[in-house]
Image (cartoon, rainbow, N blue to C red):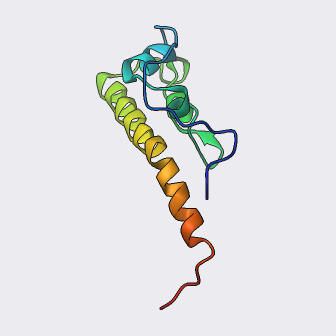
């Protein structure tokens, strides 16, 4: 389905997030607001991923592997966000077309 009307498309850029805690992860991944707010099933993907890795829950900071994983996830989301306008056009083009087998 096309993105919601409130979603804005932006090319990935630098975040204005603080440089500590979760903000450091966002800054390190150069995640734009459209990436960090990207939702699947109503959940913000990166926020949810990080919530399972809270210091209070694990009693340790993120490992380098975990930081790399969230970086890769942010990059995959950035690619999806950039593809969204084209995906929306394709959806509109085929939504009314009957399926022929």
Q: Looking at the picture, how far across and down is residue 3, in whole percent? A: 62, 49
Q: Which residue lies most toward the bottom here?
A: 101
Residue 52 visible here: no
Indicate left or right for 82 with 91 as reference: left
Indicate left or right for 64 with 91 as reference: left
Q: Is residue 56 above or below residue 48?
A: above
Indicate left or right for 74 with 6 as reference: left
Residue at point 38%, 24% (across, down): 29
Quadrant position of residue 37: top right
Residue at point 45%, 26% (across, down): 31
Residue at point 39%, 41% (across, down): 76
Q: Nearer the viewer, residue 21 or 17?
A: 17
Q: Looking at the picture, how far across and down is residue 45, in whole percent? A: 53, 38
Q: Is residue 89 above or below residue 96?
A: above
Quarter of the rendering occupied by the N terminus: bottom right
Q: Looking at the picture, how far across and down is residue 49, in whole percent? A: 50, 34
Q: Which residue lies most toward the top here?
A: 19
Residue 2 visible here: yes
Residue at point 43%, 29% (across, down): 12
Q: Is residue 91 above or below residue 18?
A: below
Q: How many marks?
A: 0
Q: Nearer the viewer, residue 91 or 76?
A: 91
Q: Looking at the picture, how far across and down is residue 40, in whole percent? A: 58, 47
Q: Nearer the viewer, residue 33 or 23?
A: 33
């Amino acid at each position: 389905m096309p993105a919601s009307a409130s979603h804005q498309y932006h090319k990935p850029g630098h975040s204005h997030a603080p440089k500590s805690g979760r903000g450091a992860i966002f800054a390190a991944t150069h995640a734009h607001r459209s990436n960090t707010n990207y939702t699947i099933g109503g959940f913000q993907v990166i926020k949810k991923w990080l919530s399972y890795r809270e210091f209070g829950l694990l009693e340790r900071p993120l490992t380098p592997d975990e930081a790399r994983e969230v970086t890769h996830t942010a990059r995959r989301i950035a690619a999806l966000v950039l593809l969204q306008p084209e995906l929306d056009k394709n959806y509109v083009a085929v939504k009314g077309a009957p399926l022929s087998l």
